[in-house]
Amino acid sequence: MAALALFSLVLRLFAVQAGGDDGASFTACLAAAGVRNVTTRGSPGYGTALRASIQNLRFAGAGAPKPAAVVAPASLEGLRAAVRCARAAGLVVRLRSGGHSYEGLSYTTEDRSAFAVVDLAALDRVRVDASRGGGGTAWVEAGATLGQVYHAVAGASQALAFSAGSCPTVGSGGHIAGGGFGLLSRKYGLAGDNVVDAVLVDAEGRVLDRGGMGEDVFWAIRGGGGGTWGAVYAWRIQLSPVPERVTAFVVNRPGSVESVARLVSTWQHVAPWLPDEFYVSAFVGAGLPESNRSAGISVTFKGLYLGPSQEALQILTARFPEIGLSDLNPREMSWIESVVFFSGLPEGSAVSDLADRVLHKKNYFKAKSDYVRRPMAFDQLIRAVDLLSKQPKAYVILDPYGGAMDRVGSGDLPFPHRKGNIHGIQYLIEWTADEDGHKDEYMDWLRRFYDVMGAYVPKNPRTAYINYMDLDLGTNNRSDSTDQNPNSEVEAARAWGERYFLGNYDRLVRAKTMIDPDNVFRNAQSIPPLRAPGMARRSPRGISPEVMSNGGAYDG
């Protein structure tokens, strides 16, 4: 108690002293709390600490805004101190779990506010309890990458899996916070659907479990976007059963614009209605890694079936023979081996390589997204494929929905793109350091292509996926406006917020007002709180003694 009182006094002192010191008061406050793993601008190791998990090199250049400090807490208490000290020093908190924010918002800023990066990389423990009924559970610290989670789960039981994304270096904290779609989602839903508890550090530094934060906030953190509600320290996830052997394949089909469009058209009419156990995505582009670049436009199908290859071939023979079965070469393997197969790791990588949190091949990219509710007409696909054939740096990823995704209501989680959506579209354009001088040209091309596609997808609003963050949709305006409406920011953010969250936007605003009324955790596309006079501010109950002592993923 004496130590806590001393720390509180130190916080008050630094709150008075803070301002324009480039992180000095933040560092001193952390030192008083016993947190040492922090670097400030100009100090040795600053560049290394900042660049450690910058995954989109578009935001790694000299002109990108840099944090006043980077701190990597190694415990729950260290995370609490980082949040409280940043607030006392007047620094905006940017949380980074894997560094895969598409717009770099976990390690940079768009409005030149003074900020600190709280890097969760050292909080990466995963503790699996495979003995629990219903498939088992695990406590996952938010800094653990998906690869680390999958590796730990398979190490505890080859019969269990977690439904989340395919890239192993993505941080679980940010991925789950955006919902988290992956290859098992047609069978088991999103990553967020499979979270049964969480530990959150709020803007006051309080530690809250599900009961403490309340169901509205617990709902919000599982799809309402990362870096918005507080610092998630750990997730308790539900694991799902998988068979001993699964089937995986990747096959590239080059051809003319018309033949590729016809294959994509058939895919649109088949993939969303395959058995829940079958996931087949389509990558379309003129420069795909799996393709013969001299062959021009192609479509690459990536398939995972939770069962033996013979069954997979029988289903494809009956439902999708156009994929071409003679050279499909489906391979049987364990589920964890299929994770490696689809991970993007170099050929010959082992299961143990999933635990490597370093993304060894980084690039520059811009992305956008859409959702589709009915198959596109063939002439529309012809036009889209023809445009893609003329820009080999661009491609689209079509992810099949249906299955379990079609049986979940749009309001069950903040992620609303469920029933009635047949697939998602991710638009991407990538370039290298040597080509960075043409980045505006590349991004403008993608935006024009996206505009063309707008005629073929649902509108009012045109929807998007928060984990494929796109600042083109709009940003928060935190100017000191004299607007008579105290909630003008909430209404302005609706322009992009309803595109990600549809009718869930207002509930997210209410949850934000409960948990972070002062908007301590914020970025260009974070949900803003209501600021109307007399707006009630909920006082969280705190974490239960049972959770603090249950020996989960943490020891306090």
Image (cartoon, rainbow, N blue to C red):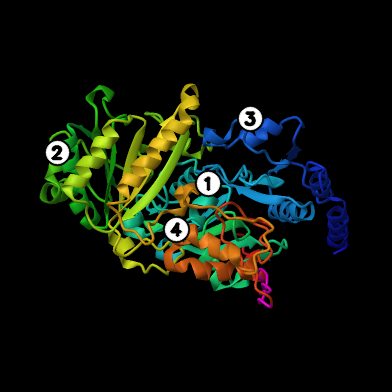
Mark 2: secondary structure: loop
Above or below, 36 against 58 in this view is below
**Secondary structure at numbered mark 3:** loop
Name the one closer to the observer, 256 or 531: 531
How many other residues sit within 10 Å of disc 2, few (<14), some (14-19) or many (≥20)? Answer: few
The residue carrying mark 3 is: 62
Amino acid type at mark 3 = Ala
The reply, left or right, for residue 334 in relation to residue 323 is: right
Rounded to the nearest whole Å, what is the CA distance between mark 2 and mark 3? 48 Å
Q: CA distance from mark 3 to mark 1?
A: 25 Å
Q: Which element type, helix, strand or loop, lies under badge 1?
A: loop
Q: Percent from the top left, x then y, of residue 343? A: 40, 39
Amino acid type of the residue tagged 4 in the rendering? Tyr
Residue shown at 53%/51% (left/top)? 174
Residue 455 percent across, percent down from the top left? 29, 51
Residue at the disc numbered 1 = 171
What residue is shown with label 4? 500
Q: Check residue 174 for magenta coloring.
A: no
Disc 2 vs disc 3: which is toward the camera? 3
- In the drawing, what numbered circle is on residue 95? none
Give the mark toward the camera: 4 or 2. Answer: 4
Q: Is disc 3 in contact with disc 4, using a CB cutoff of under 8 Å?
A: no
Instruction: For the residues labelled 4 and 2, say whether their Cβ atoms are less than 8 Å apart.
Output: no
Instruction: Point out the tag, 4 or 1, that comes first from the N-terminus.
Output: 1
Q: CA distance from mark 4 to mark 2?
A: 36 Å
Q: Which residues are magenta?
A: 534-544
Q: Are marks 2 and 1 in contact (CB under 8 Å)?
A: no
Q: Mark 3: few, some, or many residues within 10 Å (few <14, many ≥20)?
A: few
Task: Decide which of tag 3 and tag 1 comes sooner along the chain.
Answer: 3
Which disc, if any, is residue 324? 2
